[in-house]
Image (cartoon, rainbow, N blue to C red):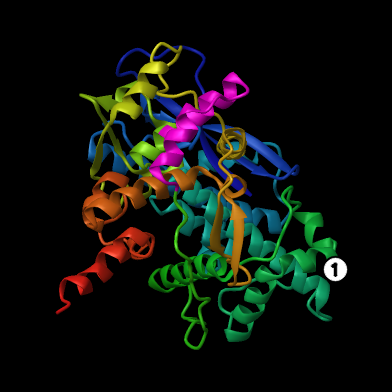
Amino acid sequence: MTIRYELRTTKKAADGERVPLHVSVSDGRDFRKRQVTKILIEPSWWDAKAAELKKRVLIPEAERSVIAKEMLALRSYISEAYGIDKEKDKIGPAWLEKMVDNYYKGKSQTPKKRRSRKKSFDELFTMFADGREISPSRTRHYHVLQRMIHRYEAYVRASLPGKSRYVFDIDDVDLDTLNDLRDYIRNEHLYVAQYPQIMEARPERRKFTERSENYLHGLFKLIKAFYAWCIKGGYTKNWPFTDFEMPKEEYGTPVIMTLDEVEHLYLAKMPTKMLEEQRDIFVFQCNVGCRVGDLMSYTKDSVQNGALEYIAAKTLHFSGRTVVVPLNSIALEIVDKYKDRPGNRLLPFISEQNYNDNIKAAFTAAGITRLVTELDPVTRKEVKHPLNEIASSHLARRTFAGNIYRQVKDPNLVASLTGHAEGSRAFNRYREIDLGMKQDLVRILENKRG
């Protein structure tokens, strides 16, 4: 079941005029309804893509807090009511309208039942995810885990005799459950082939492959945070992580482009106009070091007095500081090239996946095929790939950070340009990238001879 807010208005609101948000509820093909609420906002405050208040628009802080709390309260009310009524098969066409009306009248469905009824994993995890101030991409990551646990439930029901009604109950999860879940997530590609019924209830378009320890580390770190939230909120006393061995994170030395390669790519003839545009965006990213999510959000107003100014979405709720990156001649040239395009977007960005595909195509067209060494995240063994086969948007960010770090060797100074949190562990990896830095160090020994 998914609950979202939408701004639906057919007329242009006057300055300062407020319009109501609508709440929509969908549960596969079984239920899809939308209802107007009493939550009023100015249209300019709403981010339709993220379905939330814009993070970078100026809203009085007290008012932002009131609106956010009201959205969360109504969402939680609807989520809990839906769980109760679905069990009783009481979801009808007018259900959502009635629930919103009950909410504003201060009514609750069977109050004694609500107080005593134990919340399901789904309800709790939705409350946990919705109550955190995180970026849209991070929110999607939460929902990936939620769907994965639902598939794990289907796997247990299909594979174990006597477990045909198994549910992931937060009070019953123990060390064995966590280890079993870890095995399932790592080898899901094998289990969905062995038990096709896993995918029947919740189909996925993407193809599953074996997951790495790094990927598992991120997921179990999130599950651990969820359990800490449940205990703090009084939803459980169960802490299954006491003897659980967390998956280990391990990364190799980051691959970066040389400055000569960036220049070669920028000057190379591209076979199509579209590929030329995406190549220019990649080169721009190599010169400003931003994350791809921030890159997609830039408008023409993001450049002020020859510098790119933005608040990094990933660290917005930790520091909220403005990242200021002075634009060099290449970045300014690219901005100038697209300044007269219609609309307010800074650059002609397409979707993130198509962007990554076009980066690889641009590398191939430019003949940038240098072999690079990486640590395979699944096997933890050394592998070599042509650079054009592994190029992606994050290569641009690493290239910016790595080449600047070579010069200044100050992670906090580089972090002020990249939007990393100060003291970020990511910079431990950049200390290993530069053969030239190592050569400078060993030459110290030459100066001490004799």
Where, by quadrant of the figure, is residue 110 drawn? bottom right
Q: Quadrant of the C terminus?
A: bottom left
Residue 254 x %, y %: 45, 58
Residue found at x 48% / y 37%: 50
Q: Is residue 114 visible?
A: yes
* Amino acid type, label 1: Gln
Q: Nearer the viewer, residue 446 or 75?
A: 446
Left/right placement of residue 371 relative to residue 265 reads right
Q: Total marks drawn? A: 1
Residue 38 visible in the displayed image: no
Nearer to us in this view, 427 or 260: 260
- Quarter where residue 177 is shown: bottom right
Farthest residue to the bottom: give it. 243
Magenta stretch, residue numbers: 257-283
Disc 1: which residue: 194
Magenta stretch: residue 312 in it? no
Q: Is residue 267 magenta?
A: yes
Q: Dot 1 lies on which element?
A: helix
